[in-house]
Amino acid sequence: MDYDLIVPSASRPHLLETTLVSLLGYVDHLPGRIIIHNDEVFPDKTQDILTILDKILGTHIPWTWKNDQSPLGHGPSLAWLLNQTTIPYVLYTQDDFVTLRSLPIRETLACMETHGLHHVRFNKRKTMPYKGEGETRWYKREVQYGETPLVVSDHWYFQTSLWRVAQIKPVVDWWMGRDPVGFKEHGEIKINNGLNSVIWVTGDYQRPPKGSSWDDSQVREHYQRTFIYGHIGDPPYVKHIGDHPEDYALIRNRSATS
C-alpha cells in the first residue's frame, strides 16, 4: 500500500538531513513521494536544503517542496502538505526527529486499512503505562488488531506517525477557512479540539458522539482511533533532536544583528 511522506521544515538543513537519512534507512516500505514544506525561519538556507534533498533523494524517490520566505506557521504549512497528496495515507514527521530502529510501515498500513484506524504513531519515548498526574492522568490500554499490537493514545500527536488523510484534512481545512492567521500557532491543540468535537468543526469525517468524553479510552479507540504502535514498555522509535537553543524554530528575527 502506498503512502506519501510529509515533512514541515524550518530551514534547519543539518537536522533535516539526519531526519531523512535515518527514516528512509529504517522504513520497511519506502514512500511513493516525499513532500516538504519549508518555513524560512533561518535565512539563507534554501540552497543548503536543496543540495541535501538532491543528495539524499535525487531521482530515486519522487519529491517536491515549497519554500516560504515569510514563515506560514505550522497549521498553514500542514494544510499545504496535505493538499499535495492524493492518496489515503501519509507518514508525518518533522525535520527534527531521528529514527532509532525499524519502522513497521507495511504492517501498520495494512492494519489501518483493514480495521479503519486513523492515526498510529511511533513513540519518541518509552511507552509508559500512563500519562500525566492526578485527576488528568491517562491510563494507557493495550489492544490487538489482527497480529498488530497497539496502545490506545490520548490524542493525535505530531510525532512520526501514519495518518489517514480523510480524518484530519477536514479539520485542517476548517481551521484554514475560519482563522488561518490564528492557526499559525498551537495547531496541534486546535486540530485535536476539532477531532474531539470540543469545537464542532463541520466536515465529513468520523467524530465522537455529542456528550461523549474525548479522554475516555473506549471512545478514543472506537471514534478518534488514535494509537501508539507496540506494547506498553516498548523503547522509543524516534528521538527529538531539535532541542538546542540555536535550533529553536519559533518565528523570530534571525538576522546577524538581532
Image: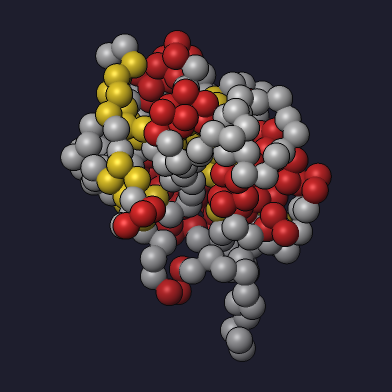
Residue reaching furthest to the right: 177
Can residue 30 be seen from the camera position used here?
A: no
- Residue 187 lies, with reference to residue 245, above or below; the image says above
In the image, what residue occupies the spot 22% across and 36% down? 232
In the figure, is residue 133 to the left or right of 29? left
Can residue 248 be seen from the camera position used here?
A: yes
Residue reaching furthest to the front: 211
Observer-nearest residue: 223 or 120? 223
- Residue 57 lies, with reference to residue 38, above or below; the image says above
In the image, what residue occupies the spot 31% across and 12% down? 146
- Residue 53 lies, with reference to residue 47, above or below; the image says above
In the image, what residue occupies the spot 40% across and 33% down? 217
Can you give x and y, in whole percent of width and height, for residue 181 in the image? Answer: 76, 59
The color scheme shown is secondary structure
Residue 151 falls in image quadrant? top left
Can you give x and y, in whole percent of width and height, for residue 213 in the image? Answer: 50, 38
Can you give x and y, in whole percent of width and height, for residue 8 in the image? Answer: 57, 49
In the figure, is residue 229 to the left or right of 3? left
Residue 115 falls in image quadrant? top left
Observer-nearest residue: 96 or 43? 96
Q: Quadrant of the C terminus?
A: bottom right
In the figure, is residue 104 to the left or right of 55? left
Question: So how many labels did they put on this image?
Answer: 0
In the image, what residue occupies the spot 75% across and 34% down? 202
Can you give x and y, in whole percent of width and height, for residue 203 in the image? Answer: 73, 30
